[in-house]
Amino acid sequence: MNVLVLTEGGGKLGLGHLSRCIALKQAITELLPTADFDFIADTDKQAQNFLRSQNTNSLSLDWLRHKSRIPHFLEKANVVIVDSYRAPVSFYRALGNPKYKRRPLVVAIDDYQRIDYPVDLVINPSIYGDSLNYAAESHNGMKFLLGKKYIILRKEFWNPAQKKIRKKIRDILITFGGTVDIKFAMGIVHFLSDKFSGINYHIIANVRGYTKKYSRCKIYSALSAQETRDLMASCDLCISAGGQTLYELIKVGIPTIGICFARNQYLNLRTAQKQNLVTFAGWSYHKGLSILIHTLIIGMDYKKRMSLSRRSRNCFAGNGAFQVAKEISRLSALDR
């Protein structure tokens, strides 16, 4: 099977699309070791560093702007997977109607019913996906994989060890993906360090060259998936955005305070809050956010953190990527 992956990442888009596509590639390769991939990503330097840290070879290309280069890859593709917030309906329609002997299976990964996808398979790999009314958009026998059964995680998060919850908070992790300037995270650290003594702060920023130093604070960039998982497991609490990383945090079982930075994150955080998986602090632009985070941390006693961790770890299985890979394999084998 030959798989063409088209995705994007970096800047305000974050790294979630890239992370999901890497995870799906890992699962397909586990299921079909002979599968061949063309991984094309519209990325900036930050996202390219991230891909290298994940041992993922990709072609960096604005594939929407240079659509004329895509037919070369479609010539041999059995499956096309698109994870994008920018691709229009017309692009998906063109993928499904190439002038080749065999039409590829076209797969769209979606978060919030962004458009009416003219594809063969729509995947919404989230804790709320099965509550959205995709059936109204169904046409021509298209299939849907929706909800927490299909949450796509990188291989290192498929079966993490049980999280140890310490009596007291000693280490706080801060990770906002690619959506936020590091100064935002440092502002939170500055505020909290005046309120709490003896706490270490760990910021995953995916940036290089940041030189400002702060006592008891360490900045990490270009971590591998294993390094990221181990850092999550070693910390007592996380302050996070609501993108793809949120699901990795939930699976690891680290108690998390969520901040919403973009529309596509809101349903993740709101639903996770309702299911008592995370504590949702609100939108990033809210006045007094740091004060609220401080209050929420005070409320994160041992009993509450134990409860959050237990519920999180058991919320969904880690094999969602395998479930998706198996369905893609099955559908791609059908005559098209």
Image: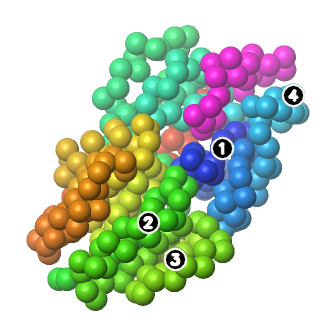
Q: Secondary structure at mark 1?
A: strand
Q: Is residue 6 magenta?
A: no
Determine the CA span between mark 2 and mark 1: 24 Å
Please state which of the two labelled residues, at mark 2 or mark 3, is closer to the viewer: 2
Label 3 crowd (10 A; few <14 / some 14-19 / many >=20): some
Q: Quadrant of residue 62?
A: top right
Q: Secondary structure at mark 3?
A: strand
Q: Residue at x 64, y 22 (%)?
A: 88
Residue 185, numbered label:
2
Q: Is residue 81 above or below residue 192?
A: above
Q: Which residue is mark 3?
A: 219
Callout 4 amino acid: Ser
Q: Position of residue 304 (x, y in %)?
A: 14, 66
Which stretch is magenta?
82-104
Please state which of the two labelled residues, at mark 2 or mark 1, is closer to the viewer: 2
Q: Which residue is mark 4?
A: 68
Viewer can see residue 96: no
Label 4 crowd (10 A; few <14 / some 14-19 / many >=20): few
Residues 251 and 208: in front is 208
Q: Position of residue 207 (x, y in %)?
A: 61, 67
Q: Is residue 85 magenta?
A: yes
Q: Secondary structure at mark 4?
A: helix
Q: Quadrant of the N terminus?
A: top right
